[in-house]
Image (cartoon, helix red, strand yellow):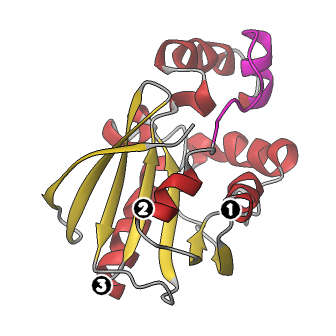
Amino acid sequence: MNAEFIAKAKLPTKYADFDVHVFMYDNKEHLVLTKGEFSKNDTVLTRVHSECLTGDGLFSLRCDCGPQLEYAMQEIGKQGQGMIIYLRQEGRGIGLLEKIKAYELQDQGVDTFDANIQLGHAADNRNYAMLASVFNHFNVSRVDIMTNNPDKINAIKEAGVTINQRIAVNVGHTKQNKAYIRTKVDKFNHLTQL
C-alpha cells in the first residue's frame, strides 16, 4: 500500500520556514516537513520521527522525543535543506490511551519495553512501510539520517534509499528519563550515548 499525497502548505516555525505535506497511509494523516528543494543527486538531511504528543507537544521529560524533534528542525534550518517525516504512531504504535496506561505501569517500576508487553502489545509496533512512497514522492535517494534507532536505519535501506551517514541525536537526556534512555539502549538496541 502506497502513501497518498493529500495537501501542502507553508509552515513557519521558530526554527525555520518549512513546507508541510500531508500523506494518507493506513487511515492516518502523516506529515512531512521539508525545507528547500531536492534534486535526485542530493544527500538530504532527514529525520524519521514518530508522533509523541506528550514529548513533542506537552514537553514531557519522560522521554527525549521533543528535544530530538527540535534538534532536527534546528539542524535543517541551519543547513537550509532537509526533511522530517512525522509518522502518526504514538507510543511506539500502540496509541495515546495505551501509552498513558504504559506510563502508569512505568510509574510502578516497569520499563517501557515490558510495559507495552504487559498491555498485550509488541514492545515496538511501529510501521515504516510508507517511507518508500514518501522518498519517491520527493525524489530522494540518498540521506544523512538523524537517528539513534537501528530499526529506522533498516527501514530506510529497505525503502531503497542510500544512507550517506548516521547523525547521532543525543539530546534531551534528563534525570526523569534516565531509565527510559537505558531501556532504549539495552532492550531496543538504540545507538545512544548514556
Q: Is residue 126 visible to us here?
A: yes
Amino acid type at image mark 2? His
Q: Residue at x 67, y 77 (%)?
A: 163
Question: Label 2: which residue?
Answer: 137
Marks 1 and 3: in contact by CB < 8 Å? no
Question: Label 1: which residue?
Answer: 148
Q: Main secondary structure of the magenta part?
A: loop
Image coordinates for residue 106, horizontal then vertical, percent: 67, 21
In the image, is residue 31 above or below residue 69? Answer: above
Amino acid type at image mark 1? Asn
In the image, is residue 178 above or below residue 26? Answer: below
User: Is 109 positioned to the left or the right of 53 in the image?
Assistant: right
In the image, is residue 73 above or below residue 167? Answer: above
Viewer-side residue, 53 vs 174? 53
The C terminus - image quarter: bottom right
Viewer-side residue, 63 vs 142? 142
For the residue labelled by badge 2, is the local secondary structure a helix, a strand or a loop? helix
Q: Decide: few, some or many residues near mark 1? Use Cα within 10 Å; few <14, some 14-19, many ≥20.
A: many
For the residue labelled by badge 1, is the local secondary structure a helix, a strand or a loop? loop
Q: Residue at x 36, y 55 (%)?
A: 32
Q: Is residue 109 visible to us here?
A: no
Q: Residue at x 50, y 63 (%)?
A: 136
Query: How many angstroms separate mark 3 from mark 2 (CA)?
Result: 20 Å
Question: Label 3: which residue?
Answer: 80
Image coordinates for residue 145, horizontal then vertical, percent: 59, 72
Front of the two marks 3 and 2: 2
Magenta highlight range: 113-127
Query: How many angstroms separate mark 1 from mark 2 (CA)?
Result: 25 Å
Query: How many angstroms separate mark 3 from mark 1 (CA)?
Result: 23 Å
Viewer-side residue, 109 vs 27? 27
